[in-house]
Image: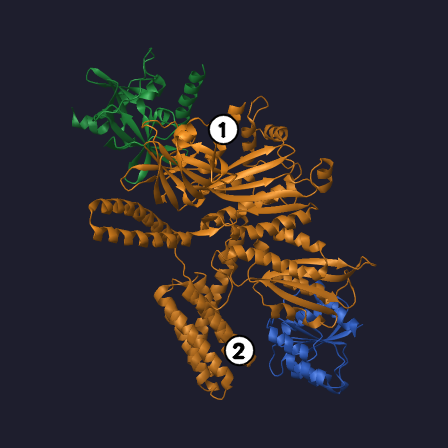
Amino acid sequence: MHTILVVDDFASIRQVVAETLQRHGFKTEQASDGQDALDKLKGGALQVDLILSDFNMPNMDGLGLLRAVKGDPKLKKHPFILLTSEQDTEKKRLAKEAGLDAWIQKPYKIESFIGMISYTINKK
Amino acid sequence: MSKHDEVFREEALEQLEIAEQALLSFERSFDLQDIEEAFRSLHTFKGAAHIFSFKELGDFAHLIEYVLDGIRNKVIHNEPGITTKTLNYLDHLRKMMNESDQFTKTKKHKQILEEVNEIANHVIKTLKQNNQEKEEALLEADIDQEDQENISTYYASLNPTEPIDSGSFHPIFQIFEELADKTTLEIVEERDKNNEALISRWDLYISGQITKEDISAEFLFIEDEVTTSIHKVANFDLFKEMGFDELLKVLKKIPSEQKLEEITQYVSSLKDTLDTEESKQNTDKKQKKNSSLRVSSEKIDDLMNLVSELVTDQASLHLLASQSNNSQLEALAENIHRHIQQLRDISFDMTLVPVERMTGKFHRMVRDCALAMDKEVDFIVKGEKTELDKTFIETLSDPIMHMLRNCVDHGIETPEERIEKGKPVKGTITFDAFYSGTKVQIDIIDDGKGLSIPAIKNKAIEKGLITAEEALTDQEVFQLIFIPGFSTAQNVTDVSGRGVGMDVVKKNIESIHGSIDIHSKEGQGTTFTIKVPLTLSIIDGLLVKADDTHFIVPLAMVHKCYEVPYNLLANNVSKWITVDNEPHPFINIRKEMTLNTTPVPIKGMGINIQGRERSIILIVDEIIGNYQTVLKPISDYYKDQDFISGATILGDGSIALVLDINKLIEQEKLTNMIDEQ
Amino acid sequence: MNNEATATKQMKAYLTFKLNHEVFALGVDKVVEIMEVPRVTKVPKAPDYMKGVINLRGQVLPVIDTRIKFGLTPIELTKDHCIIVINMIIDEKTMYFGALVDQVLEVLEMDEETMLPTPNVNSKYDMRFIQGLLKEGDDFVMVLDIDHTFSIEEIEAIKENNQEQQRD
């Protein structure tokens, strides 16, 4: 069973996403912003198979977290997905440059959301 | 913010200046073009701000864009002081650039931000609602080209490095879904030759308020697996254009590498037509502002009517001046004559465009339609220089498109059928436009299977339009096609079964006082004849006289004039005379029109006239000279005298009759045939 | 005449004119103007009753010899003759034409309800074109049914009759 780290500053959204994933056979962990997620991942305290993060968050946003993860030799193997309502093409490009694996647009359809997550995990 | 990058600063301030000027200009003129301009420069500003990561500047500009959007779409254009408000917002943007970073934390900033936000939200909400209503309206009404602003059409080809399983959760399918949510999207898959479940290529046709970069960003995260190439093919919505459905069918059939070229050609054929309207290209706008302006068609009509009156008055003036023995007056009259002629030509030009403006897309549509249905068709256009009122071209374009589609679909047979019938494999459709007196005639001729009278009748009986007992002439049977709800196609095909029927075609043509007739012979083909008046009907004519009646011959058709003694014709039974050492058929107007009030003079004049089918010599008593002819319709009471296409008022107030030479030749041919029998 | 009575009655104005010594009337609502006969340009090959076209302030107006409708001899123009310019709506199109008459008389105000039905008697006139009769003093005035009389179909019908007669 794969474990997914759900990063979002809104607890309610985090909960909804996590429940959706659990219903489809994933285990989930949660973090409240980029910094929180990074702290949990650093040092191998938390083992996950995929990071699913929001874009706009306080302390460290999704892009910052992505850059930190992909810049860390130990963490960079983690598939990284941004789940966001952000539409800005430029941000997408920056994320891609930073090594993002997939970009899921909010609002999403559950079927394709789960499909994307499975696809990204299995690709690695 | 004073430390901000100079490059951005300079450019951004320039854009704000343009936006400001445009708004000020809008305040004076209420010309929405100005709002367009303000919108464009603000958009540029926003883009630059985002690139230089000045998020707050960009976001604020984005909000102002909504305000402008609201004005341009007439959501808030009536709100008092909206222009002043918008100008204030621009000032505020400028302040944000000049003041320190702390400025955005001030209460004043937050207040103004809130205000803009409120307007923006109102605009967004209203526009969304309007769009829904508009979509519903579109189902019934014609497509208004103006609504297509900012919409572009793209062609994208996607080549996966490895074929992708159509049943998988590959992200590409989610991307398609997302794209389909915000654009009009047509996806054509190409399956792998060895495995039907695998897709080896996609061709996408995308229309929407989206940029090439936006589309390319959609595929960003699968770029290692799928090679995409995106081309902007039009800066309007191709999905709404006539003939695009056919094009899509053709595109499915041709090799991948030819598709882009094919679309480009289609678009350029459309542009020939679109250019008659205000060009939709967002090319250098300032330049265009100098070279063209929009005038309501009513004003043009008024102008043309006045010019017509002037031309008639001028003829009277000319007559009076020549009778006055006052050389100064004569010279003045001559000058006025010249100026009026120039005025006439210029005003005329404003309203007329050659029919070739619409035939470009006909070529395309016929070709695509034939390809889509595996038929072979030659499309021949004649008389593409024939000029017609611009609005008429716009009105006729769609009906003719529909008729041509019908010709290919129901008229022309398949190559097999044609071979069986002993016809050339390739069918021919001819579009022939020409002047016919005060009218322009457009013939659409196909050499296909023709209309089946029994089939039409049966259908009409079936539909309860006629009873089985009714005895109808062939013409009356053909006319049944124009009754609403009538369609001869046994099976409605996806090509001509869609869209408007012939009743709508007829209605459109009649809306511009035109008429449509059908001639058809089963097995041999069908001819549709459309006649529309020239709105503006001043022509250069040759004023002639036979007996006591004045006639006008269109000068464009006059080739040469000769002196012809009447006695040469007296004993001539052959109806041929020799001029310039060559025999020509002739028509003696006196005899043809039974004009015999005055005695036949000794000398007559022969005018060599180039008719549409052949040339003839027209014999009259006297050639008076060139005459600027303001064509006036002659009443329907004279519709049987169709060799007279109209009348004009001469300088002395009397009337000259305008001859329709082609009709005259036609009739002459008929009487000759009767004579021979 | 009683003023109060006229106010409640439906009054209609008629223009009366003479054709071959007989008085006819038509509703003034259809009449645009009355004019002297200007120079008429004959349109070749048109039937005799289509007198030709005239210039009415820059517009070309067809002129119909009204006598034809009643099987009378065509009008030989004299200075008494007048053209009544009539406007009529046919198939949603407004048509203007001039009706050539022997002499225009006067405008009568008559109660529409006093119109008598067309007598079903043998007459030298084609009664199909008479809407009814108005009594003016001791005389009767025949009111023309304009729409019917001058419709293009009717004009065409005459032409066909004439052609048939010619063939016979």
**In which quarter of the view is residue B172 placed?**
bottom right
Colour in which chain A is shown? blue
Q: Chain of mark 1?
A: B
Residue B642 in percent (x, y) is at 43, 33
Residue beneath disc 1 = B574
> Along the horizontal axis of the image, is C149 left or right of B374?
left
Which residue is depicted at the point 36% across and 67% down? B27
Residue B9 in percent (x, y) is at 48, 83
Image quarter (top left, top right, bottom left or bottom right) of the C terminus of chain B = top right
Colour in which chain B is shown? orange
Which residue is depicted at the point 59% across and 73% down? A88
> Along the horizontal axis of the image, is B363 left or right of B187?
left
Mark 2 vs mark 1, foreground winner is 1
| Residue A114 at least partly seen | no
Amino acid type, callout 1: Ser
- Nearer to us in this view, A61 or B173: B173
Residue beneath disc 2 = B48
Which residue is depicted at the point 59% across and 36% down? B526
- Nearer to us in this view, B372 or A41: B372
Please, which residue is most extreme toward the front here? Answer: B581
- Nearer to us in this view, B583 or B75: B583
Q: Residues within 10 Å of mark 2 (few under 14, many from 20)?
A: some
Amino acid type, callout 2: Ala
Secondary element type, mark 2: helix
Colour in which chain C is shown? green
Q: Chain of mark 2?
A: B
Q: Residues within 10 Å of mark 1 (few under 14, many from 20)?
A: few
**In which quarter of the view is residue B484 placed?**
top right
- Nearer to us in this view, B467 or A6: B467
| Residue C44 at least partly seen | yes
